[in-house]
Image: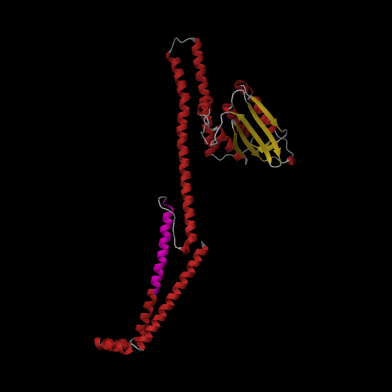
Amino acid sequence: MKNSLRRFKIRLFLELSLQIVGAILLLFLGLRLVDGILNDFIANFLFSLDSGLYRFCVRNKEALLFLIGSGTIMIVIYFTIRKTSNYLEQIITSINQVFNKDEGLVVLPTDFKEIENQLNSIKYETLRSEQAQQQEQQKRDDLVVYLAHDLKTPLTSIIGYLSLLNDEKEISEELREKYTQIALEKSYRLESLINEFFDITRFALQKQTLNKEPVNLSVMLQQLTDEFYPLFEERQVQCQLQLKEGVMIEADADKLARVFDNLLRNALAYCDSGSDIEIILQENAGGVELMFANIGPQLSADQISLLFEKFYRADPSRSAATGGAGLGLAIARDIVELHGGTINAVGHGKRIEFHLHFRTLPKNTGRKAPQDKA
């Protein structure tokens, strides 16, 4: 932009200088004509009009010439300023055009090409920012819709079964116990959904802090899978572990355990009954590599790209059955990125893999990692 302005100032200076020089030359030539070839003609013409006018012009010849010369220069300066103001008006119009999304791209004279590019870049960024704001607003609107829908389903069931228990006074003890158990299960599901919504809202609205300490990932994953053993049995699923021993990272153990818990629950929700869930932990010079894999419904590339979006469910019917709100993977991604790590999903037919990468803890840290964090 500085180059464009510098070129414009040089061009404006040259134009003004040439115009002033040209005006002076024309004035000089005019004076030569007046004093020379046209002198007698002008004198006779003025005298024929009015002898007093003739004498006035003769006596004030130098002053009149000065006024004519000054006027000529002023006219030249006026048109130069007018031309400059036209440029400024074009720039001001273009600036207004930048913030009008209905207008097209900014077009300026060649001298202002860099300014044109800058303004078009600002226009593009402004439009992109507006689109991002609209998308965020849409997500907030979706949050309300999903919240109402997901909370209404278990709440309706709870009200229905409790109404039956209240209205049917002579219901059998067996049915009473059955309805009470169903209402309790729906209440637990409702509690789980509310907790998920609170979690994702907290991550979205509050600045999260990490209480980092050395964590032994090998021990944490072993402990966590042991806790899931009853759920593995229920789904008739085997969890295959390949964990390198003594893999250390510096992390918030509670939040990290939440990541692994969400990934395991996601695998259980979508894996085929009787299949295996794999967890592989490796360490190399680049850091810690962790993979969760399971066999389930085959997902398209578009579906995989949306897995970490809030409220996205690859299979809504399965998610409804498990009580998930489609927030587990979104929360996991937020926590991983908060630790400076990465997480992504890769599909291989019916096999889906979640790859996580973390930085390792230096071996010479001298601190002992807690063994009971999970």
Q: Horizontally, is 356 left or right of 35 in the view? A: right
The answer to whether residue 255 is seen in the rendering is no
Please name whichever residue, 60 or 115, is drawn nearer the observer in this view of the structure: 115
Q: Which residues are magenta?
A: 76-100
Instruction: Give the residue drawn at x 51%, y 11%.
Output: 174
Residue 202 pos. (x, y %):
53, 36
Q: Quadrant of residue 292?
A: top right
Instruction: Give the residue drawn at x 36%, y 88%.
Output: 35
Q: Would you place residue 7 above or below residue 210 in this image? A: below
Q: Horizontally, is 345 left or right of 51 in the view? A: right
Please check the rendered image and state whether residue 103 is part of the magenta-colored stretch, yes or no: no
Please name whichever residue, 16 or 202, is drawn nearer the observer in this view of the structure: 16
Q: Horizontally, is 337 left or right of 50 in the view? A: right
Residue 76 pos. (x, y %):
39, 74
Q: Quadrant of residue 57?
A: bottom left
Report the label total. Answer: 0
Residue lying at the far front of the rendered structure: 349
Q: Would you place residue 55 above or below residue 362 in this image? A: below
Residue 289 pos. (x, y %):
67, 37
Instruction: Give the residue drawn at x 49%, y 16%.
Output: 179
Q: Quadrant of residue 254?
A: top right
